[in-house]
Amino acid sequence: MEFRYLPMTREDKQEMMETIGIENTEELFADIPGSVRLQKELELKEPKNEYALMKELTAMANRNTSTKDVVSFLGAGVYDHYTPSIVDHVISKSEFYTAYTPYQPEISQGELQAIFEFQTMISELTALPIANSSMYDGGTSLAEAVNLSAAQTKRKKVLVSDAVHPEYQQVIHTYAKGQEVEIIPIPLQNGKTDLVHLEELLNEDIAGVVVQYPNFFGQIEPMEAIQKLLENQKKTMLIVSSNPLALGYLTPPGEFGADIVTGDTQVFGIPAQFGGPHCGYFATSKKLMRKVPGRLVGQTKDENGVRGYVLTLQAREQHIRRDKATSNICSNQALNALASSVAMSSIGKHGIWKMSEMNMQKARYAKKKLKEEGISIVYDGPFFNEFVIQLNQDITKVNAALLEKGILGGFDLGKIDPSYHGQMLVAVTEIRTKQEIDQLAKELRDMHG
């Protein structure tokens, strides 16, 4: 049989039509007006047998460039980090690989415990007591936090720093529109949130203040100063989006009084692959535990006193009236959350601290080396593993030339704002070597002139 993966035979199809009393599949669409239906065949290639199809798809896939082929200095939200080999072994186990929603705890203890461990690790990293089982990604997680702040405070204005990831800002605007929440931008000063403008914008109508730590430009926001500005603001919530790897070294937002901390665990065990799938996290204080979107797994004991795990505080629209639901998110990223949990467990608490320290050290060496080669550094504040450089030519052309040398260059900031023309956001992770950093500096020096 040439097409062994087709779901049915002609005989199967005929039997189904006879069972439901139709003569052809066109009858299934009789209620759809002809004026809105496509009146021609789809322009598709002729079907191929399995071998020919795999050959064609393999040829197409081989045209891609991956971080296995080149040295990556590209970050901006998706990073090239070390992934322990055990991660793929664990998440490939069928009991995890095929698991979806553990509604029946009697047969889902393994999946439930894995989620519980993920929640525990996120809670420790953020210094907040409650964390959910995961979200789609960092952007949707942050947008859920914005909506939660508006619902909790019964206010309709949220301040969002311009140093928050631009794609996250777009997701926030999309979510906020449906809830009629007004998003007010906070301008920047030297690559960080302008605290003077923030203080001017604060008033009794503000539901929350959103900052990223470290921010999109790699800069470390002055969290203590931001916390002090909010001390006299009743109800106004501090919402922080954080790279969880950075929290292995930096003071966690929970210690600065953050009400909600969100982010993306792609940095732990999830490869960079065409923008997804990712795994968002969502952590908060106990007072908001009943407003947390998504799923929560709790630990309990059964009637025999044996430890067990169950879904708890289920306030999604699948379980209660839609208008009373905390969120309409209907899923989580359990498999990717498991990957992150395995990665964090394998690397260990001290390993994560060392890994984050290596990111900081290597990024500082790269900054120093580029500066020595005559490359301008745009911001001079403290940073994690990313920083911005200024070149005297178009970044698209620079990155094309770098790719020919086997280097995936940094993110072109001109794509998000024309005023950033010629600026590149360079990411340096723990797996970059001195030789690779030196090569980047040499190539950029030669191009920069």
Image (cartoon, helix red, strand yellow):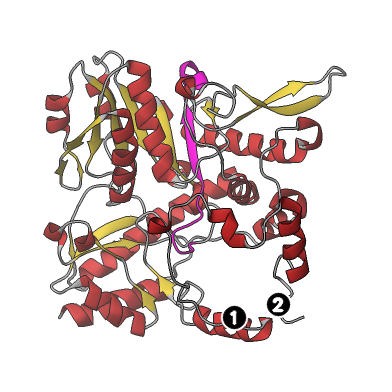
Place of residue 439 in the rendered image (x, y in percent of width and height, measured from the top left): 34, 78
Instruction: Please tell me which residue is depicted at 65% across the width and 51% down the height of the picture.
Output: 346
**Circle 1 is placed at which residue position?**
47
Q: Earlier in the sequence, mark 1 or mark 2?
A: 2
Residue 185: assigned label: none
Q: Which residues are magenta?
A: 272-290
- Would residue 252 be visible to someone looking at this image? no
- Would residue 74 be visible to someone looking at this image? yes
The amino acid at mark 2 is: Phe
Whether pointer 1 and pointer 2 mark residues with C-beta atoms closer than 8 Å, the reply is yes
Q: Quadrant of residue 231?
A: top left
Place of residue 82 in the rendered image (x, y in percent of width and height, measured from the top left): 54, 61
The amino acid at mark 1 is: Pro
Residue 286 colored in magenta in the image: yes
* Residue 90 to residue 131: above or below: below
Residue 370 colored in magenta in the image: no
Residue 3: assigned label: 2
